[in-house]
Amino acid sequence: MKTPISGTIRHSTDDDKPRIHEIAVQAWTPIFDRYRMIVGDEIWNDIWKGWEEGWFINAAGIVTELDDEIMGFATWEAPVEGIFGELGGNAVDPRFQGRGIGTAQMRWVVDNFHIKGYKCLKVHTGMDPAHGPARAEYRNVGMRLGVKRSQYYNYLDEVARIPIRSSLSFRWADPDDIDLISQMCRKAWGSVYESIMNTVGHEIFEIAFKETLNHRVDESTKRAADAPRKVRIVMEDGCPAGFAFLGATHQQKLGKIFTLGVTPEFRGKGIGCAICVDAFNTFRERNLRYVSLSADLGEVNEQTRQMCWNAGLYRELPSIDYYMML
Ligand SMILES: CC(C)(COP(=O)(O)OP(=O)(O)OC[C@H]1O[C@@H](n2cnc3c(N)ncnc32)[C@H](O)[C@@H]1OP(=O)(O)O)[C@@H](O)C(=O)NCCC(=O)NCCS
């Protein structure tokens, strides 16, 4: 154990921004290196190369100073002013890590929310080994209840090529499908929010998630109404069974499965995996090279992981949102 250091914590000023940027780039380099190990050089180069440029160039919050040198910084946000706070990006110059500065900064931010009467806090962080110290500093200030999410990647020539069974048919949505999409989203995500509630408990759920399902369904319905040709619908023997919202960033050669859902009565029959395989075909037709799938908060469970592995989406960047009541 290294000797703890306690510097002075103060609010940052505009003059601190270049130093904050410098610390952020140094501190996040091992994290981006870890992403490279997980996704492979080619995907990494097309998606993250040059990440340093804009990294925390405009951050404001607190800094920790010792002998006129800034050693670390922390930021925060307020998703619901006066009630629900969020710990934001924070880092410590690698030369001074492991000496209690990160935890002291988090204590300062948590205490500050407490003094202002906030009820609940959250923080988002990675579940990969490079985020180990970050998870430790959040644990140190009492943040332990977590809900996971994941981003899965792979090369389109590495994913599974599974034949789609004949009882399944796929089509693009059309404007008449909007009500159907709204109903399917609500059915598919109902169980997700139930599992989040079981994980975080009623008190946190009421503050952090109360209207989230309604907002998400409304937003997705609007997206489908604006661009129905980005929504795939899958039918099993003529009955609607699931959906996927697709997109692409052509510059990065990346096809994106933004969200995918199978309604509860059709689960456990390989339909999620078939939706992925159908999306892979669509992306190949568009000359894309990679695919990503987002599993949102509460959607990472045994079934999702199995579906991703079956489909060959095994390059996973897992993350977690921790919550606590103050
Ligand atoms: C996260 C970070 C700010 C922590 O700063 P720090 O000053 O080193 O933090 P502390 O010294 O207070 O605590 C470090 C903790 O990490 C633990 N730790 C160190 N290396 C670790 C590893 N490889 N895996 C898991 N835990 C580790 C230490 O044991 C310590 O925990 P403890 O207090 O329970 O013993 C710093 O590591 C950093 O800048 N990381 C890169 C940027 C980042 O991840 N920011 C947060 C993004 S969500």
Image (cartoon, rainbow, N blue to C red):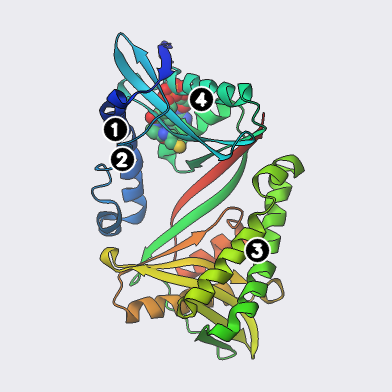
Label located before the other in sequence (1 or 2): 1
Q: Is mark 2 within 8 Å of ligand 1?
A: no
Viewer-nearest of labels 2 and 3?
2
Q: Residue at x 67, y 51 (%)?
A: 196
Residue 279 image offset from top left, x and y in percent: 44, 76
- In the picture of the structure, the residue carrying the numbered disc 2 is 55
| Label of residue 189 in the image | 3
Q: Which residue is mark 4?
A: 106
Q: CA distance from mark 3 to mark 1?
A: 38 Å
Amino acid type at mark 3 = Trp
Give the alpha-carbon distance from disc 4 to disc 2, as whole Å.
Answer: 20 Å
Is disc 3 placed on a helix, strand or loop?
Answer: helix
Q: How far apart are the two marked residues, 1 and 4, measured between alpha carbons?
A: 19 Å
Q: Residue at x 26, y 42 (%)?
A: 52
The kind of residue tagged 4 is Met
Of residues 104 and 300, the one nearer the viewer is 104
Q: Earlier in the sequence, mark 2 or mark 3?
A: 2
Query: Could you say whether the residue bearing mark 2 is in a helix, strand or loop?
Result: loop
| Horizontal side of residue 249 vs 49, given as left or right | right
Cβ of mark 4 under 8 Å from ligand 1: the answer is: yes
